[in-house]
Image (tube, grey):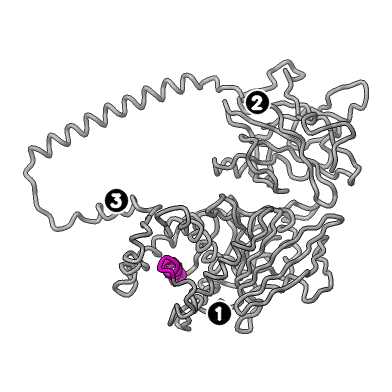
């Protein structure tokens, strides 16, 4: 989209109202009323729909065509920018109900359809909405802008409004005073109790005990629940300790990860129209971190794909972990890539393994262009190496085209982990070196999108981390991934493999092709993509 002739970005800012038509304040504790004047021109295609973007930080990244929702912000305070509407086609119509704003136009003598008043924070019930214009936080600074989309999915934003601060809650001062008083009283009580305990302990004779008992063990476990850092200088000794007694420490740490994140809802994945889109019945994306497609008209579940945003070393949404596309979801896969502005795909499975489909062959088989939904994909070139293939695609929607790079690691065995540790390390180095830098998250998939994908994401994170820090925390990285998607790093064997990869790098053996993970290909181990996994018939 283009702006109307004569307009520059600064002239497109939404304007806060001084007061609403009823005479009440245009800025309350939970709402902001603004006038939006339609700045968009149809010169590059008719504007099909709009959304309103709200941000606490105007420098926060809002380049993705689909942004987090209001619900995402409530669940994760680190998210600074979100969109209030899905696809609002009649934003500038007098009868618009998008976002349950008041829908009233700002009355003008000429061209009254070119502007309207919209209330940010006007919706109070958001349980069933993908995108929701939910209430704002009190006493908080916000910036607002309008985004227009053409039919091809291209979009343009107005400039952000000036900074707008919501009103302070009427009970804020009283609550603050009450809170301070409460804290002081609690501190006094704690001090008295601690003093009494110390006095009694001094008077009580000491008793020798062999063990501190289960409570002490539980407290120690709680203290190290989330983070277990290891200095790089101590890492070789740490690996030896973890490997002692038949890998006892690996087993204990991995056991502590098993239930992480498992209590989080997956309602969208369980919605009946979406169930056939899941390759496995129990590998489902958590609602709070799932990737949401732009919904299509009158199609239930059209915003759904089995994929989650994943944190990395550089950002909280550095990757998208997803399942290997099914024949019925390959179009959605490409739609996700386009909407998220992703330019890189990392594939860690072969399409067929042991006679079973692990992933659809979702890209063209030859140089002829092929359509996936509205997107055209054509192969520009391919580079074949012994362990991987790099393919350059040109992906087009209408007149716009983007180059996408596909990194396919072909030698991860049906069972276990790669035999040659250095092979996967070299693959990660190559991917990191050849990434298309601009664009959205790296899309990473295997079959279920949790085992091999999780292992690669953690390895990529670690190899960036050790360039800047003097310690690593593999446990914490896996823990955080499992809060975003179920079963990331799916087996204890993969967890151990990550330690061995890092040790290989720290010892300077990553170029030593004899540094093999001997014995790791073992049919006694479960298939990393099949543990407790039931395929959809």
Going from N to C along the chain, the mark reached first, 1 or 2, is: 2
Q: Is residue 506 magenta?
A: yes
- Quarter of the figure with residue 449: bottom right
In the displayed structure, 171 sits above or below 422; it is above
Going from N to C along the chain, the mark reached first, 3 or 1, is: 3
Q: Position of residue 174 (x, y in %)?
A: 46, 19
Identify the secondary structure beneath mark 3: helix
Disc 2 to disc 3: CB gap under 8 Å: no
- On residue 414, the disc is 1
Identify the secondary structure beneath mark 1: loop
At 27% from the left edge and 55% from the top edge, which residue is drawn? 217
Q: Position of residue 17 (x, y in %)?
A: 74, 21
Query: Few, some or many C-alpha atoms within 10 Å of disc 2 (few <14, some 14-19, many ≥20)?
Result: some
Q: Work out how far the residue at label 1 is from the one at label 2, CA to CA, in angstroms.
A: 56 Å
The region drawn magenta spans 493-508
Residue pointed to by mark 3: 219
- Quarter of the figure with residue 325: bottom right
Q: In the rendered view of the protein, which quadrant contains the N terminus? A: top right
**Residue 527 or 3: which is nearer the viewer?**
3
In the displayed structure, 11 sits above or below 334; it is above
- On residue 175, the disc is none
Residue pointed to by mark 2: 164
């Amino acid at each position: 989209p283009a702006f109307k002739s004569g307009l520059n970005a600064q002239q497109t800012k939404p304007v806060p109202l001084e007061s609403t038509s009823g005479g009440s304040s245009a800025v309350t504790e939970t709402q902001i009323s603004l006038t939006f004047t339609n700045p968009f021109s149809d010169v590059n295609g008719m504007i099909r729909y709009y959304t309103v973007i709200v941000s606490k930080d105007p420098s926060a990244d809002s380049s993705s065509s689909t942004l987090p929702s209001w619900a995402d912000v409530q669940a994760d305070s680190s998210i600074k920018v979100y969109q209030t509407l899905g696809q609002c086609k009649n934003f500038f119509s007098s009868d618009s109900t998008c976002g349950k704003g008041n829908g009233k136009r700002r009355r003008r003598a000429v061209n009254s359809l070119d502007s309207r008043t919209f209330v940010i924070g006007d919706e109070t019930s958001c349980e069933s909405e993908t995108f929701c214009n939910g209430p704002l936080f009190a006493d908080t600074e916000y910036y607002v802008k309008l985004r227009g989309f053409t039919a091809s999915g291209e979009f343009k934003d107005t400039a952000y409004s000036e900074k707008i601060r919501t009103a302070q809650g009427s009970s804020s001062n009283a609550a603050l005073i009450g809170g301070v008083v409460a804290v002081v009283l609690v501190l006094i009580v704690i001090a008295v109790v601690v003093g009494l305990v110390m006095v009694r302990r001094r008077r009580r004779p000491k008793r020798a005990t062999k063990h501190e008992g289960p409570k002490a063990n539980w407290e120690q476990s709680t203290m190290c629940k989330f983070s277990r850092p290891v200095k790089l200088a101590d890492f070789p000794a740490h690996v030896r300790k973890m490997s002692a007694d038949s890998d006892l420490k690996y087993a204990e740490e991995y056991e502590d990860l098993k239930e992480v994140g498992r209590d989080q809802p997956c309602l969208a994945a369980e919605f009946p129209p979406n169930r056939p889109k899941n390759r496995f019945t129990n590998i489902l994306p958590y609602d709070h971190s799932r990737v949401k497609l732009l919904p299509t008209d009158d199609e239930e579940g059209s915003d759904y794909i089995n994929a989650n945003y994943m944190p990395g070393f550089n950002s909280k949404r550095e990757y998208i972990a997803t399942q290997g596309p099914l024949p019925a979801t390959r179009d959605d896969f490409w739609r996700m890539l386009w909407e998220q502005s992703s330019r890189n795909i990392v594939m860690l499975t072969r399409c067929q393994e042991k006679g079973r489909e692990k992933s659809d062959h979702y890209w063209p088989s030859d140089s002829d262009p092929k359509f996936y939904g509205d997107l055209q994909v054509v192969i520009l070139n391919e580079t074949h190496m012994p362990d991987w293939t790099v393919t350059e695609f040109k992906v087009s929607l209408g007149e716009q085209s983007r180059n996408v790079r596909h990194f396919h690691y072909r030698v991860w065995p049906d069972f276990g982990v790669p035999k040659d540790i250095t092979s996967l390390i070299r693959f990660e180095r190559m991917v990191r070196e050849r990434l298309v830098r601009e664009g959205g998250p790296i899309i990473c998939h295997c079959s279920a999108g949790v085992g091999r994908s999780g292992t690669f994401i953690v390895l990529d994170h670690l190899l960036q981390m050790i360039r800047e820090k003097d310690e690593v925390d593999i446990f914490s990285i896996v823990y955080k991934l499992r809060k975003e998607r179920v079963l990331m790093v799916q087996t204890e064997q993969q967890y151990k493999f990550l330690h061995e990869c890092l040790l290989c790098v720290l010892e300077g053996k990553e170029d030593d092709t004899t540094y093999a993970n001997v014995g790791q290909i073992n049919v006694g181990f479960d298939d990393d993509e099949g543990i407790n996994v039931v395929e959809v018939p």
